[in-house]
Amino acid sequence: MAAFLSFCWPGLGQLYGGRRRVAALLALPVMALAAFFLIQALNGVAVLGSRMFVPAFAISILALAILVGFWRIVAIIDAFRAVGTSADRRRPAVRVLLAALLLLVVGTHGLLAYDSWAFLDASSRIFVGGQPAPTLAPGQTANPAATDNGAGANYGGGSAIIPPTTSSRVTILLTGIDAYRTRTEALNDTLLVVSFDPVKKTAAILSVPRDTSEFPLYFGGVYHGKINSLMTWVYLKFVASPDNPINTLTKELGFLLGIPINYYAAVDMANFRTMIDLVGGVDVNNPKWINDPLYDWLDGSPPGLQLSPGPHHLDGRLALAYVRSRFGLGDNDYTRAARQQEVIVALAKKMASPAGIAQLPALLNAAAGAIKTNIPSDRVPDMVQLAGDFDPANITQIVLGPPYNYHPDSSTTGGVWTSRLYMDKIAALSVKLFGTDSRYYTHPAAGAPVDTPPPSASPVGPTPR
Protein backbone atom coordinates (compact mmCIF):
# COMPACT_ATOMS: atom_id res chain seq x y z
CA MET A 1 0.00 0.00 0.00
CA ALA A 2 2.82 2.44 0.86
CA ALA A 3 4.59 1.68 -2.43
CA PHE A 4 1.36 2.16 -4.39
CA LEU A 5 0.63 5.51 -2.70
CA SER A 6 4.12 6.79 -3.57
CA PHE A 7 3.56 5.54 -7.10
CA CYS A 8 0.47 7.77 -7.25
CA TRP A 9 2.42 10.73 -5.84
CA PRO A 10 5.94 10.75 -4.37
CA GLY A 11 5.76 11.11 -0.58
CA LEU A 12 2.24 9.76 -0.03
CA GLY A 13 3.60 6.34 0.95
CA GLN A 14 5.99 7.96 3.41
CA LEU A 15 3.11 9.99 4.88
CA TYR A 16 1.13 6.73 5.18
CA GLY A 17 4.06 5.31 7.18
CA GLY A 18 4.22 8.35 9.49
CA ARG A 19 7.42 9.88 8.02
CA ARG A 20 6.21 13.41 7.45
CA ARG A 21 9.56 15.12 6.81
CA VAL A 22 10.61 12.57 4.21
CA ALA A 23 7.12 12.81 2.67
CA ALA A 24 7.46 16.60 2.33
CA LEU A 25 10.96 16.27 0.87
CA LEU A 26 9.75 13.87 -1.82
CA ALA A 27 6.43 15.58 -2.55
CA LEU A 28 7.29 19.30 -2.71
CA PRO A 29 9.57 19.29 -5.81
CA VAL A 30 6.93 17.40 -7.79
CA MET A 31 4.24 19.76 -6.51
CA ALA A 32 6.33 22.75 -7.71
CA LEU A 33 6.65 21.15 -11.17
CA ALA A 34 2.92 20.44 -11.29
CA ALA A 35 2.18 24.08 -10.37
CA PHE A 36 4.52 25.28 -13.13
CA PHE A 37 2.78 23.19 -15.79
CA LEU A 38 -0.65 24.17 -14.47
CA ILE A 39 0.25 27.84 -14.95
CA GLN A 40 1.56 27.06 -18.45
CA ALA A 41 -1.69 25.26 -19.28
CA LEU A 42 -3.81 28.31 -18.38
CA ASN A 43 -3.18 29.59 -21.92
CA GLY A 44 -4.62 26.37 -23.32
CA VAL A 45 -3.45 22.82 -23.83
CA ALA A 46 -2.71 23.55 -27.51
CA VAL A 47 -0.34 26.37 -26.55
CA LEU A 48 1.39 24.17 -23.97
CA GLY A 49 1.75 21.37 -26.52
CA SER A 50 3.16 23.74 -29.13
CA ARG A 51 5.95 24.69 -26.72
CA MET A 52 7.36 21.24 -27.34
CA PHE A 53 8.57 22.53 -30.71
CA VAL A 54 10.86 24.99 -28.89
CA PRO A 55 14.15 23.04 -28.58
CA ALA A 56 15.05 24.36 -25.11
CA PHE A 57 11.60 23.43 -23.78
CA ALA A 58 11.68 19.96 -25.37
CA ILE A 59 15.14 19.28 -23.93
CA SER A 60 13.92 20.39 -20.51
CA ILE A 61 10.92 18.04 -20.70
CA LEU A 62 13.16 15.18 -21.80
CA ALA A 63 15.50 15.77 -18.85
CA LEU A 64 12.57 16.17 -16.44
CA ALA A 65 11.00 12.93 -17.70
CA ILE A 66 14.16 11.07 -16.73
CA LEU A 67 14.75 12.87 -13.43
CA VAL A 68 11.15 12.71 -12.20
CA GLY A 69 10.99 9.05 -13.20
CA PHE A 70 14.10 8.37 -11.11
CA TRP A 71 12.59 10.43 -8.25
CA ARG A 72 9.39 8.33 -8.32
CA ILE A 73 11.35 5.07 -8.30
CA VAL A 74 13.31 6.23 -5.25
CA ALA A 75 10.05 7.22 -3.50
CA ILE A 76 8.38 3.87 -4.30
CA ILE A 77 11.29 1.73 -3.14
CA ASP A 78 11.81 3.84 0.01
CA ALA A 79 8.11 3.55 0.93
CA PHE A 80 8.15 -0.20 0.24
CA ARG A 81 11.17 -0.79 2.48
CA ALA A 82 10.03 1.44 5.35
CA VAL A 83 6.60 -0.10 5.95
CA GLY A 84 5.74 -3.65 6.98
CA THR A 85 7.97 -6.54 8.06
CA SER A 86 10.76 -8.33 6.22
CA ALA A 87 8.46 -11.32 5.80
CA ASP A 88 5.83 -9.12 4.17
CA ARG A 89 8.38 -7.70 1.72
CA ARG A 90 9.62 -11.17 0.73
CA ARG A 91 6.21 -12.45 -0.30
CA PRO A 92 6.25 -13.25 -4.07
CA ALA A 93 2.93 -11.53 -4.76
CA VAL A 94 4.12 -8.33 -3.07
CA ARG A 95 7.39 -8.33 -5.05
CA VAL A 96 5.50 -8.85 -8.29
CA LEU A 97 3.29 -5.86 -7.51
CA LEU A 98 6.37 -3.76 -6.69
CA ALA A 99 8.01 -4.77 -9.97
CA ALA A 100 4.82 -3.89 -11.86
CA LEU A 101 4.74 -0.42 -10.30
CA LEU A 102 8.40 0.18 -11.18
CA LEU A 103 7.88 -1.02 -14.76
CA LEU A 104 4.92 1.33 -15.13
CA VAL A 105 7.08 4.25 -14.04
CA VAL A 106 9.90 3.29 -16.40
CA GLY A 107 7.45 2.76 -19.27
CA THR A 108 5.49 5.99 -18.89
CA HIS A 109 8.55 8.18 -18.36
CA GLY A 110 10.41 6.40 -21.13
CA LEU A 111 7.49 7.13 -23.47
CA LEU A 112 7.44 10.77 -22.41
CA ALA A 113 11.20 11.04 -23.00
CA TYR A 114 10.79 9.38 -26.41
CA ASP A 115 7.99 11.76 -27.38
CA SER A 116 10.11 14.72 -26.25
CA TRP A 117 12.94 13.49 -28.46
CA ALA A 118 10.49 13.10 -31.36
CA PHE A 119 9.45 16.75 -30.94
CA LEU A 120 13.09 17.84 -30.78
CA ASP A 121 13.98 15.89 -33.92
CA ALA A 122 10.90 17.10 -35.81
CA SER A 123 11.58 20.70 -34.80
CA SER A 124 15.11 20.57 -36.24
CA ARG A 125 13.70 19.33 -39.56
CA ILE A 126 10.55 21.47 -39.79
CA PHE A 127 11.86 24.88 -38.70
CA VAL A 128 14.51 25.64 -41.30
CA GLY A 129 14.72 29.39 -40.74
CA GLY A 130 18.22 30.72 -40.30
CA GLN A 131 19.92 27.91 -42.22
CA PRO A 132 22.20 29.20 -44.98
CA ALA A 133 21.11 28.61 -48.55
CA PRO A 134 23.39 26.00 -50.17
CA THR A 135 25.39 27.10 -53.19
CA LEU A 136 26.35 25.15 -56.29
CA ALA A 137 29.94 24.02 -56.66
CA PRO A 138 31.90 25.14 -59.76
CA GLY A 139 30.60 23.21 -62.74
CA GLN A 140 27.61 21.83 -60.81
CA THR A 141 24.13 22.26 -62.30
CA ALA A 142 20.78 22.45 -60.55
CA ASN A 143 18.95 19.18 -60.06
CA PRO A 144 15.51 19.42 -61.68
CA ALA A 145 14.12 16.36 -59.84
CA ALA A 146 10.70 17.06 -58.42
CA THR A 147 11.48 15.25 -55.20
CA ASP A 148 14.19 17.74 -54.26
CA ASN A 149 11.92 19.72 -51.98
CA GLY A 150 13.67 19.32 -48.65
CA ALA A 151 15.69 21.91 -46.79
CA GLY A 152 17.91 22.38 -49.82
CA ALA A 153 18.11 25.26 -52.24
CA ASN A 154 14.34 25.71 -52.14
CA TYR A 155 14.12 26.35 -48.39
CA GLY A 156 17.51 27.59 -47.22
CA GLY A 157 18.34 31.10 -46.16
CA GLY A 158 15.49 32.34 -44.29
CA SER A 159 14.54 33.93 -41.14
CA ALA A 160 11.36 35.98 -41.43
CA ILE A 161 11.25 37.90 -44.70
CA ILE A 162 9.78 40.87 -42.83
CA PRO A 163 9.86 40.15 -39.07
CA PRO A 164 6.59 41.21 -37.41
CA THR A 165 6.35 42.89 -34.04
CA THR A 166 4.19 41.48 -31.26
CA SER A 167 1.33 43.86 -32.13
CA SER A 168 1.67 44.03 -35.92
CA ARG A 169 -0.17 41.98 -38.53
CA VAL A 170 1.22 38.47 -39.07
CA THR A 171 0.88 37.01 -42.57
CA ILE A 172 1.83 33.47 -43.56
CA LEU A 173 1.97 31.67 -46.88
CA LEU A 174 0.75 28.06 -46.71
CA THR A 175 1.72 26.21 -49.86
CA GLY A 176 1.18 22.60 -50.82
CA ILE A 177 3.81 21.19 -53.18
CA ASP A 178 2.64 18.45 -55.52
CA ALA A 179 5.86 16.53 -56.10
CA TYR A 180 4.71 12.90 -56.08
CA ARG A 181 7.28 10.29 -57.04
CA THR A 182 5.96 9.93 -60.60
CA ARG A 183 6.07 13.65 -61.33
CA THR A 184 8.85 15.31 -63.34
CA GLU A 185 8.50 18.70 -61.64
CA ALA A 186 7.42 20.18 -58.32
CA LEU A 187 4.31 22.36 -58.49
CA ASN A 188 2.80 24.65 -55.85
CA ASP A 189 -0.77 23.49 -56.34
CA THR A 190 -2.00 24.98 -53.05
CA LEU A 191 -1.41 28.65 -52.33
CA LEU A 192 -3.11 29.99 -49.18
CA VAL A 193 -2.23 33.32 -47.62
CA VAL A 194 -3.37 33.65 -43.99
CA SER A 195 -3.21 37.08 -42.37
CA PHE A 196 -3.91 37.84 -38.68
CA ASP A 197 -4.51 41.27 -37.17
CA PRO A 198 -3.84 40.78 -33.43
CA VAL A 199 -5.21 44.23 -32.54
CA LYS A 200 -8.53 44.10 -34.38
CA LYS A 201 -8.86 40.32 -33.83
CA THR A 202 -9.62 39.69 -37.48
CA ALA A 203 -8.13 37.27 -39.99
CA ALA A 204 -8.28 36.65 -43.73
CA ILE A 205 -7.57 33.49 -45.72
CA LEU A 206 -6.94 34.03 -49.44
CA SER A 207 -6.59 31.17 -51.92
CA VAL A 208 -4.60 32.13 -55.02
CA PRO A 209 -5.41 30.04 -58.13
CA ARG A 210 -2.43 27.91 -59.18
CA ASP A 211 -3.13 28.70 -62.87
CA THR A 212 -2.55 32.44 -62.40
CA SER A 213 -0.23 33.71 -65.12
CA GLU A 214 0.97 36.94 -66.80
CA PHE A 215 1.63 38.76 -63.53
CA PRO A 216 4.24 41.41 -62.64
CA LEU A 217 7.31 40.30 -60.67
CA TYR A 218 8.47 42.20 -57.62
CA PHE A 219 12.02 42.36 -59.01
CA GLY A 220 10.88 43.56 -62.47
CA GLY A 221 9.40 41.98 -65.54
CA VAL A 222 6.35 39.84 -66.13
CA TYR A 223 6.07 36.09 -65.51
CA HIS A 224 4.31 34.32 -68.37
CA GLY A 225 4.08 30.89 -66.77
CA LYS A 226 1.64 29.71 -64.13
CA ILE A 227 2.41 30.79 -60.60
CA ASN A 228 2.57 27.18 -59.40
CA SER A 229 5.74 26.67 -61.49
CA LEU A 230 7.59 29.77 -60.23
CA MET A 231 9.60 27.96 -57.54
CA THR A 232 10.78 25.29 -59.97
CA TRP A 233 11.89 27.81 -62.58
CA VAL A 234 13.78 29.86 -60.00
CA TYR A 235 15.43 26.67 -58.73
CA LEU A 236 16.50 25.73 -62.26
CA LYS A 237 17.95 29.25 -62.72
CA PHE A 238 15.64 29.96 -65.67
CA VAL A 239 14.27 32.94 -63.74
CA ALA A 240 16.92 35.26 -62.34
CA SER A 241 15.39 35.99 -58.96
CA PRO A 242 17.44 37.73 -56.26
CA ASP A 243 16.02 35.25 -53.73
CA ASN A 244 15.87 31.48 -53.29
CA PRO A 245 12.78 29.65 -54.64
CA ILE A 246 10.53 29.71 -51.58
CA ASN A 247 11.37 33.30 -50.68
CA THR A 248 10.72 34.29 -54.30
CA LEU A 249 7.25 32.75 -54.17
CA THR A 250 6.56 34.26 -50.74
CA LYS A 251 7.61 37.78 -51.74
CA GLU A 252 5.79 37.51 -55.06
CA LEU A 253 2.46 36.65 -53.47
CA GLY A 254 2.90 39.44 -50.94
CA PHE A 255 3.69 41.80 -53.83
CA LEU A 256 0.56 40.79 -55.77
CA LEU A 257 -1.78 40.84 -52.76
CA GLY A 258 -0.31 44.07 -51.43
CA ILE A 259 0.48 42.69 -47.97
CA PRO A 260 3.99 41.79 -46.77
CA ILE A 261 4.20 38.07 -46.00
CA ASN A 262 6.29 37.36 -42.91
CA TYR A 263 6.60 33.59 -43.00
CA TYR A 264 6.00 30.57 -45.18
CA ALA A 265 5.00 26.99 -44.40
CA ALA A 266 5.42 24.52 -47.27
CA VAL A 267 3.75 21.09 -47.21
CA ASP A 268 4.72 18.18 -49.47
CA MET A 269 1.44 16.57 -50.52
CA ALA A 270 2.75 12.96 -50.59
CA ASN A 271 3.73 13.16 -46.90
CA PHE A 272 0.47 15.00 -46.22
CA ARG A 273 -1.27 11.77 -47.27
CA THR A 274 0.82 9.82 -44.73
CA MET A 275 -0.18 12.22 -41.94
CA ILE A 276 -3.87 11.70 -42.70
CA ASP A 277 -3.47 7.90 -42.61
CA LEU A 278 -1.65 8.09 -39.26
CA VAL A 279 -4.59 9.87 -37.57
CA GLY A 280 -7.08 7.40 -39.04
CA GLY A 281 -8.40 9.60 -41.85
CA VAL A 282 -10.39 12.84 -41.87
CA ASP A 283 -14.11 13.69 -42.03
CA VAL A 284 -15.37 16.08 -44.70
CA ASN A 285 -18.73 17.20 -46.08
CA ASN A 286 -18.47 17.12 -49.86
CA PRO A 287 -20.72 19.94 -51.19
CA LYS A 288 -21.44 18.38 -54.61
CA TRP A 289 -20.76 15.42 -56.87
CA ILE A 290 -17.16 14.99 -57.97
CA ASN A 291 -16.84 13.14 -61.25
CA ASP A 292 -13.33 13.67 -62.56
CA PRO A 293 -12.57 11.15 -65.34
CA LEU A 294 -9.07 12.60 -65.80
CA TYR A 295 -7.90 12.35 -62.19
CA ASP A 296 -4.43 10.77 -62.09
CA TRP A 297 -3.83 8.74 -58.91
CA LEU A 298 -0.07 8.85 -59.63
CA ASP A 299 0.30 5.23 -58.49
CA GLY A 300 -0.58 3.30 -61.66
CA SER A 301 -4.30 2.98 -60.87
CA PRO A 302 -6.81 3.66 -63.69
CA PRO A 303 -7.65 7.37 -63.90
CA GLY A 304 -10.91 8.76 -62.58
CA LEU A 305 -12.43 9.93 -59.28
CA GLN A 306 -16.07 9.81 -58.23
CA LEU A 307 -17.34 11.04 -54.88
CA SER A 308 -20.98 11.61 -53.93
CA PRO A 309 -22.13 14.73 -52.07
CA GLY A 310 -22.49 14.59 -48.30
CA PRO A 311 -20.37 13.44 -45.33
CA HIS A 312 -17.40 11.19 -46.05
CA HIS A 313 -14.55 9.67 -44.06
CA LEU A 314 -11.44 9.88 -46.24
CA ASP A 315 -8.22 7.93 -45.88
CA GLY A 316 -4.95 9.53 -46.98
CA ARG A 317 -5.18 8.39 -50.61
CA LEU A 318 -8.75 9.63 -51.07
CA ALA A 319 -8.13 12.85 -49.12
CA LEU A 320 -5.21 13.64 -51.40
CA ALA A 321 -7.48 13.08 -54.41
CA TYR A 322 -10.14 15.30 -52.79
CA VAL A 323 -7.71 18.23 -52.60
CA ARG A 324 -6.04 17.59 -55.98
CA SER A 325 -8.99 16.92 -58.30
CA ARG A 326 -10.19 19.87 -60.40
CA PHE A 327 -11.39 18.53 -63.77
CA GLY A 328 -14.84 17.23 -62.82
CA LEU A 329 -18.01 18.81 -64.19
CA GLY A 330 -18.41 22.19 -62.47
CA ASP A 331 -15.04 21.81 -60.77
CA ASN A 332 -12.06 24.09 -61.13
CA ASP A 333 -9.14 25.49 -59.20
CA TYR A 334 -11.50 27.61 -57.10
CA THR A 335 -13.71 24.76 -55.85
CA ARG A 336 -10.58 22.72 -55.17
CA ALA A 337 -9.13 25.55 -53.07
CA ALA A 338 -12.24 25.50 -50.85
CA ARG A 339 -11.84 21.72 -50.37
CA GLN A 340 -8.18 22.22 -49.46
CA GLN A 341 -9.15 24.63 -46.69
CA GLU A 342 -11.69 22.09 -45.40
CA VAL A 343 -9.19 19.21 -45.27
CA ILE A 344 -6.53 21.31 -43.52
CA VAL A 345 -9.01 22.16 -40.75
CA ALA A 346 -10.15 18.52 -40.51
CA LEU A 347 -6.56 17.28 -40.20
CA ALA A 348 -5.81 19.81 -37.47
CA LYS A 349 -8.77 18.50 -35.46
CA LYS A 350 -7.71 14.86 -35.86
CA MET A 351 -4.12 15.62 -34.83
CA ALA A 352 -5.47 16.88 -31.50
CA SER A 353 -7.71 13.81 -31.04
CA PRO A 354 -6.77 10.62 -29.11
CA ALA A 355 -6.03 8.91 -32.45
CA GLY A 356 -3.53 11.63 -33.30
CA ILE A 357 -1.90 11.67 -29.87
CA ALA A 358 -1.52 7.86 -29.92
CA GLN A 359 0.45 8.16 -33.18
CA LEU A 360 2.49 11.13 -31.97
CA PRO A 361 6.09 9.97 -32.75
CA ALA A 362 5.15 8.60 -36.20
CA LEU A 363 3.01 11.67 -36.89
CA LEU A 364 5.86 13.99 -35.95
CA ASN A 365 8.22 12.06 -38.20
CA ALA A 366 5.76 12.35 -41.11
CA ALA A 367 5.26 16.05 -40.36
CA ALA A 368 9.03 16.57 -40.40
CA GLY A 369 9.13 15.06 -43.87
CA ALA A 370 6.10 17.04 -45.03
CA ILE A 371 6.51 20.53 -43.56
CA LYS A 372 9.22 23.16 -43.93
CA THR A 373 8.80 26.65 -42.46
CA ASN A 374 10.86 29.71 -41.56
CA ILE A 375 8.61 30.53 -38.58
CA PRO A 376 10.95 30.66 -35.56
CA SER A 377 10.10 27.70 -33.35
CA ASP A 378 9.97 29.92 -30.25
CA ARG A 379 7.18 31.98 -31.89
CA VAL A 380 4.93 28.97 -32.45
CA PRO A 381 3.25 29.07 -28.99
CA ASP A 382 2.42 32.77 -29.43
CA MET A 383 0.97 32.12 -32.88
CA VAL A 384 -1.08 29.15 -31.66
CA GLN A 385 -2.49 31.34 -28.90
CA LEU A 386 -3.14 34.11 -31.43
CA ALA A 387 -5.05 31.72 -33.71
CA GLY A 388 -7.04 30.36 -30.75
CA ASP A 389 -8.18 33.86 -29.78
CA PHE A 390 -9.96 34.43 -33.08
CA ASP A 391 -13.72 34.18 -33.42
CA PRO A 392 -14.52 32.18 -36.60
CA ALA A 393 -17.05 34.90 -37.42
CA ASN A 394 -14.13 37.33 -37.80
CA ILE A 395 -12.28 35.17 -40.32
CA THR A 396 -12.81 36.11 -43.97
CA GLN A 397 -12.24 33.30 -46.51
CA ILE A 398 -11.84 34.25 -50.17
CA VAL A 399 -10.87 32.27 -53.25
CA LEU A 400 -9.44 34.65 -55.85
CA GLY A 401 -11.48 33.34 -58.73
CA PRO A 402 -14.10 35.49 -60.52
CA PRO A 403 -14.65 38.39 -60.09
CA TYR A 404 -11.01 38.85 -59.11
CA ASN A 405 -9.64 37.08 -62.18
CA TYR A 406 -10.66 36.01 -65.64
CA HIS A 407 -9.98 33.15 -68.03
CA PRO A 408 -8.49 34.35 -71.33
CA ASP A 409 -9.62 32.68 -74.53
CA SER A 410 -7.63 29.45 -74.91
CA SER A 411 -6.88 30.34 -78.54
CA THR A 412 -4.58 33.05 -77.16
CA THR A 413 -2.76 30.72 -74.75
CA GLY A 414 -1.95 27.79 -77.03
CA GLY A 415 -5.00 25.85 -75.84
CA VAL A 416 -3.84 25.92 -72.20
CA TRP A 417 -6.28 26.87 -69.41
CA THR A 418 -4.89 29.83 -67.47
CA SER A 419 -6.25 32.69 -65.42
CA ARG A 420 -5.18 36.29 -64.99
CA LEU A 421 -5.77 38.62 -62.09
CA TYR A 422 -7.72 41.85 -62.34
CA MET A 423 -5.04 43.81 -60.50
CA ASP A 424 -7.33 46.79 -59.87
CA LYS A 425 -9.84 44.50 -58.11
CA ILE A 426 -7.05 42.78 -56.16
CA ALA A 427 -5.85 46.22 -55.05
CA ALA A 428 -9.33 47.23 -53.89
CA LEU A 429 -9.76 43.94 -52.00
CA SER A 430 -6.34 44.34 -50.40
CA VAL A 431 -7.21 47.80 -49.07
CA LYS A 432 -10.59 46.53 -47.83
CA LEU A 433 -9.03 43.59 -45.95
CA PHE A 434 -5.73 45.08 -44.78
CA GLY A 435 -6.35 48.83 -44.66
CA THR A 436 -3.22 50.91 -44.24
CA ASP A 437 -1.11 47.73 -44.09
CA SER A 438 -1.73 47.26 -47.82
CA ARG A 439 0.82 48.72 -50.23
CA TYR A 440 -2.10 49.64 -52.50
CA TYR A 441 -3.36 52.05 -49.80
CA THR A 442 -0.56 54.50 -50.58
CA HIS A 443 0.24 53.27 -54.11
CA PRO A 444 -3.15 52.67 -55.81
CA ALA A 445 -1.51 52.87 -59.25
CA ALA A 446 0.26 49.60 -58.46
CA GLY A 447 -3.05 47.88 -59.18
CA ALA A 448 -2.98 48.75 -62.88
CA PRO A 449 -3.82 45.92 -65.31
CA VAL A 450 -0.93 43.81 -66.58
CA ASP A 451 -1.92 42.26 -69.90
CA THR A 452 1.37 43.03 -71.63
CA PRO A 453 4.84 43.74 -70.24
CA PRO A 454 5.47 47.42 -69.57
CA PRO A 455 8.19 49.00 -71.74
CA SER A 456 10.66 49.06 -68.84
CA ALA A 457 10.28 45.37 -67.99
CA SER A 458 11.26 42.36 -70.00
CA PRO A 459 9.02 39.25 -69.97
CA VAL A 460 10.41 36.25 -68.11
CA GLY A 461 9.25 32.74 -67.31
CA PRO A 462 8.04 29.77 -69.28
CA THR A 463 5.16 29.62 -71.69
CA PRO A 464 2.00 28.58 -69.76
CA ARG A 465 1.26 24.82 -69.79
Image (cartoon, helix red, strand yellow):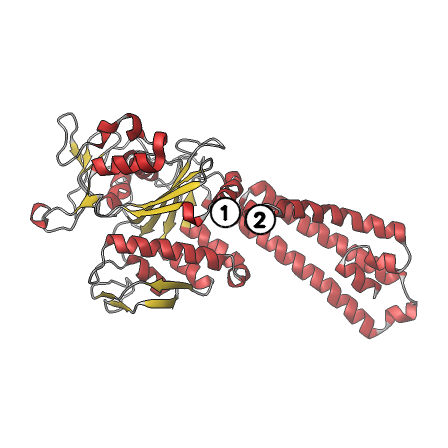
Most distant residue in the front direction? 393
| Position in image of residue 386 (x %, y %) | 49, 42
Q: Residue 388 carries which label?
A: 1
Tell me the crowding category of disc 2: few under 14, some 14 to 19, or many 20 or more residues within 10 angstroms, Cα based. Answer: some
| Position in image of residue 325 (x %, y %) | 26, 59
Tell me what residue is drawn at x 25 percent, y 29 percent.
Answer: 219
Could you tell whether 207 is left or right of 352 in the image? left
Q: Name the residue under label 2.
A: 44
Q: Which of 460 and 174 is in front in this view?
A: 174
Look at the image and tell me whether residue 149 can be seen: no
Label 2 element class? loop
Q: Which of marks 1 and 2 is nearer the N terminus?
A: 2
Could you tell whether 333 is left or right of 358 in the image? left
Q: Are marks 1 and 2 in contact (CB under 8 Å)?
A: yes
Residue 189 against residue 451 in the figure, above or below: below
Tell me what residue is drawn at x 34 percent, y 55 percent.
Answer: 340
Residue 361 against residue 156 in the figure, above or below: below
**Where, quadrant-wise, is the N terminus in this rendering?**
bottom right
Badge 2 amino acid: Gly
- The part of the image, by quadrant, that contains residue 40 is top right
Badge 1 amino acid: Gly
Could you tell whether 185 is left or right of 18 in the image? left
Label 1 element class? helix
| Position in image of residue 36 (x %, y %) | 68, 44
How far apart marks 1 and 2 lie (CA) works out to 9 Å
